[in-house]
Image (cartoon, coloured by chain):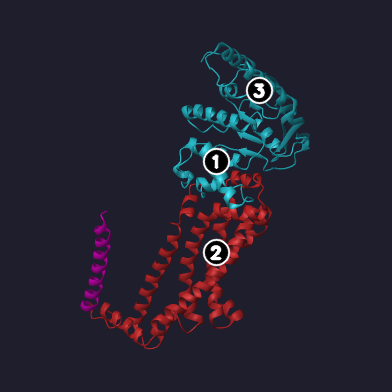
Chain colours: A red, B cyan
Amino acid sequence: MKRWESLFWPALVAATGLTVWALGVRLTHTSIFPSPVSVYRGLVELVSKGLLWRYIADSLFRVGSGFGLALVTGVPLGIVLGYYPVAFKTINPVIQIMRPISPLAWIPLSIVWFGVGNLAAVFLIFLAAFFPLVMATINGVRNIPEIYLRAGHNFGLSPAAVLSRVMFPAALPQILIGLRISLGVAWLVVVAAEMIAVDSGLGYLIIDSRNAGKRYDLVVAGMLLIGVIGLGLDTAIARLDRLNFIRRGKSL
Amino acid sequence: MLKSALALDEAANRKAKTKLTIEGVGMRFSEHGKSVDVLDSLRLEVSEGEFVCILGPSGCGKSTLLNIVGGFLKPTSGAVYIDGEQVDGPDPRRIFVFQERGVFPWLTVEGNVGFGLFNLPKKEKQERIAHYVKLVGLQGFEHSYPQELSGGMKQRLEVARALAVNPDMLFLDEPFGALDSITRLVMRGELLRIWEAERKTILFVTHDIEEAVQLADRVVVMSVRPAQIRRIVEVEIPHPRDISSPRYLKLRDSIFDEIGLAHQV
């Protein structure tokens, strides 16, 4: 595809979608579903009330905290479990049982433990991000070719240096895949968490707009914002992949 | 005349000093409850600066022997001594070189060569890297990643990484096995050139009879499992070796006979 084409075709599809949406609303005379124009007006209203940036910032902060917490605990745990087969055999069954439980199933317990508030939301996001990250790191470490570790030992590296100079870079491409998946899941879950546990954020915007006055223009505006920001997060983390030393490590 | 006398002298000196002693090394693996004898009380001495090829059919245990000598495996019986010290683990004074897939793909050529030089001051490290990059002919590729190099270049990179830490022994485990036959020939010449420049003691495992006779001072011919040393062939032909000379061919063919292979295909 030529450069202009890679912009033109997606733009055309988006424009067509918006047109179909606008026409659909007009022709059906629906009073519930908002038109693109009213969604736009809703967004402007949010900005003028000073709510938009605050909600976005609150949602991002919760995702950042939960995801960050998962990062600093999940990656080290994954490295340990990937490296020591005994630890893996011992702990893996627990992980495999916990992993299929949707973070949403934890909502009642998280409210019991952390009350209604930020902490409960962050905990849910942490849970969502933690397991994919641990699994990806375990796989990354287990798939490190034996000869890299042997070379590390042969050159007289301390165990800590083998970890940081051989195991970590060798597993990094896999860990990055885990980061991307878990950030995506974390963003999915923040919306759900905000619907029940807090009174700000994009999830709260959606549920509150519906409950207080059936403002479906704001509901749809919230949904679109979540989509756009999710895309932005994914693009940002996929960019990490372009760093030279990470990209090259993929030729394992 | 004087030169050859010196060479003889040097050879005598080398003979005098034993670098490596393999003393009654046996190895038994347990697989699925069955135990398999891989090595059967091997004995071998290697002198300092010597180039020894260990030759045997695939699966005969020659790589196992090299792993024991390198300190990566403990023998079931017997022991390995280097400079009179018993080997009980890998050591940066003795570097193992694998097929070219042993280089680190996340490091550049420079990064790979400098990998083992973490104890050196920066300036010295840079000098060492530059020296060994040049020795293996990778100038101009300092900032390239292994992915961008050919198989032969990767192999030379791994040799440079090993040499950079100034080891006194190199263990090479079928290092050219994955290269095409032309590159393999070139690499043999390169390895000899480097060996002549640096005079490391080299233990080189191969299943290629031609390769062994082209490279080694001595060829250790192994039997099938449980491996014993069938014969040690001294190759007293100076380098560069004429691989169509009657002497070379006679030595080569005697090893073909020893292993029980016909000369016709």
Could you tell me the amino acid type at mark 1?
His
State the residue lying farthest toward the front.
B2
Query: Which is closer to the viewer, label 1 or label 3?
Result: 1
Q: Circle 3: is it few (<14), some (14-19), or many (20+) Cα within 10 Å?
A: some
- Residue B241 drawn above or below residue A30: above
* Front residue of this view, candidates B236 and B228: B236
Asked if badge 3 and badge 2 are on a common chain, one would say no
Query: Which is closer to the viewer, label 3 or label 2?
Result: 3
Instruction: Report which residue position mark 1 lands on.
Output: B131
For image coordinates 53% across by 62% down, the residue present is A132
Query: Residue A87, percent across and down?
Result: 67, 57
User: Is A62 on the left or on the right of B253, as rendered?
Assistant: left
Q: How many labels were placed on the picture?
A: 3
> Which region shows up in magenta?
A1-27
Could you tell me the amino acid type at mark 3?
Arg
Can residue A33 be seen by looking at this rendering?
no
Instruction: Report which residue position mark 3 lands on.
Output: B218
Label 3 element class:
strand
User: Is A136 on the left or on the right of B226, as rendered?
Assistant: left
Does the magenta stretch mainly form a helix, a strand or a loop? helix
Q: CA distance from mark 3 to mark 2?
A: 61 Å
Q: Give the number of the disc on residue B250.
A: none
- Image mark 1: chain: B
Q: Give the number of the disc on residue A100.
A: 2
Cβ–Cβ under 8 Å for marks 1 and 2 = no
Could you tell me the amino acid type at mark 2?
Pro
For image coordinates 65% across by 39% down, the residue present is B167
State the residue lying farthest toward the top.
B246
Query: Residue A8, percent across and down?
Result: 24, 62
Query: Which is closer to the viewer, label 1 or label 2?
Result: 1
- Image mark 3: chain: B
